[in-house]
Amino acid sequence: MRYTIGNDILKAEADTLGAELCSVKLFGREQLWQNENGAWAGHAPVLFPVCGNCAVRIGGVDYAMPRHGFARRMQFVLDGRGENFLRFLLRESGETMKLFPFPFSLYVTYTIEGGMLSTRYEVVCRGEELPFSCGMHTSYRLLGSVFDHMLVFPKEEEFSAYAHDSQGRLTGERIRYGCGQVFPFPERGLSEGKTVILGGLRSQSVSLCSARRGVLAEIEFAGFSHLLLWRPEGANMICIEPWLNLPDHVGEMKEFYEKEVVLLKRGESAHFEQKIYYQSGDAE
C-alpha cells in the first residue's frame, strides 16, 4: 500500500513494500527515476542488513543473503503518520531469520520540511546482539545527458574508486579520477552496469549539479562511510548511494562480524539519516 505526504513545494509517496520511496515531486515535477526506458524498476530501495554483494557468515555458517539485503523485498507496516512524515517498521520473521539469524526492529521514517526530504533509519537490537550494515540507494531523474552532470563537494577530495568485477565484488585495484571538489560523471565508470565506489571522502555532503541548469539537489549523508554512483544502462538518471559497508573482495571468506558492521547489544539502537534539499534548477 502507498502513502503520500507533502506540502506546496514537495510531495513524496512511499510503499509498504520495502518502505521504498516511489515518487518525489518538486512543484509537481518528478524527481525519482520512473523506469522510463525499462532498464530498472527501482526508485530508492532501502539497503539492510547489508549493502551490495556482502556475504553473511556467522560462526562458520553461510546464510543466503541477497545482494543489498532483504529489507527492500519485505512488507513493512505503517507505524506512524502525520501531515509531513511517514514511519514504517520491519521486524524479524521466520523468513528473515533464515537469511539473518538476529532479532531486530528497522524503522524507516520519511519527513518533509519545505523542499527538504529526510530519510532516517533507526535500527534496534531485540536479541543478545545485532551486527548489521545499511545504506541508501536514492535515484535522481536527470534531463539531458547524464554526462552533463557532476557532483560538487564542499572539501577538496582525492577521487579514488574501488574497482569491481561483474558480480560487484572488489578486485583490489583502484581507479584514479584526480583531485578537487568537482567530480564529473565518468562515462566509462557508469556504463555497462558499472558502479563508481568512492571511499575515503572527507566531505559529508555533496551537490548534484547540471552544467546547464546549476544545482539540482544538495545531499547530506553524515555518518556514512562510502558514496557510490550507479545508473542502469541508457538511463537518464543517477543513483547517489551513501553506504556503511563496502562489497566483499573477490574470494573473501570473512565472518560477518569482521566486516564494516555496526554491532549493537540488547536494547541498543543506532540511527542514520540522509537529507536531500531539492532545488528547482532542473525545470523542464
Image (spheres, helix red, strand yellow):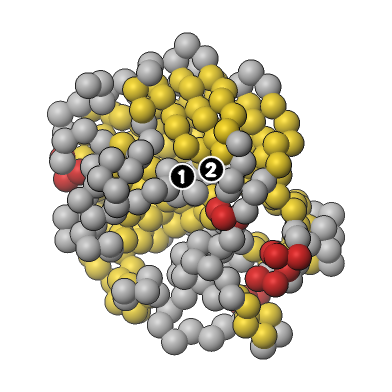
Camera-nearest residue between 93 and 27: 93
Q: Is residue 6 above or below residue 152?
A: above
Spot the residue most to the top.
8
The residue depicted at 35 percent of the width and 79 percent of the height is 172
* Residue 227, image quadrant: bottom left
Camera-nearest residue between 175 and 191: 191
Crowding near the residue tagged with mark 1, few <14, some 14–19, many ≥20 C-alpha atoms within 10 Å: many
Name the image quarter holding the C terminus: top left
Name the image quarter holding the N terminus: top right
As shown in the figure, which amino acid type bears the numbered disc 2?
Answer: Glu
Residue wearing tag 1? 44
From the top left corner, tell me how far across and down residue 266 is, in percent. 84, 60
From the top left corner, tell me how far across and down residue 261 is, in percent. 61, 66
Residue 71, visible in the rendered structure: yes
Q: Secondary structure at mark 1?
A: loop
Task: Report the label total.
Answer: 2
Instruction: Give the left or right position of residue 218, taking residue 129 as reference.
Output: left
Q: Is residue 274 above or below residue 11?
A: below
As shown in the figure, which amino acid type bears the numbered disc 1?
Answer: Ala
Crowding near the residue tagged with mark 2, few <14, some 14–19, many ≥20 C-alpha atoms within 10 Å: many
Residue wearing tag 2? 20
Distance between mark 2 and mark 1 Cα atoms: 6 Å
Q: Is residue 6 above or below residue 156?
A: above
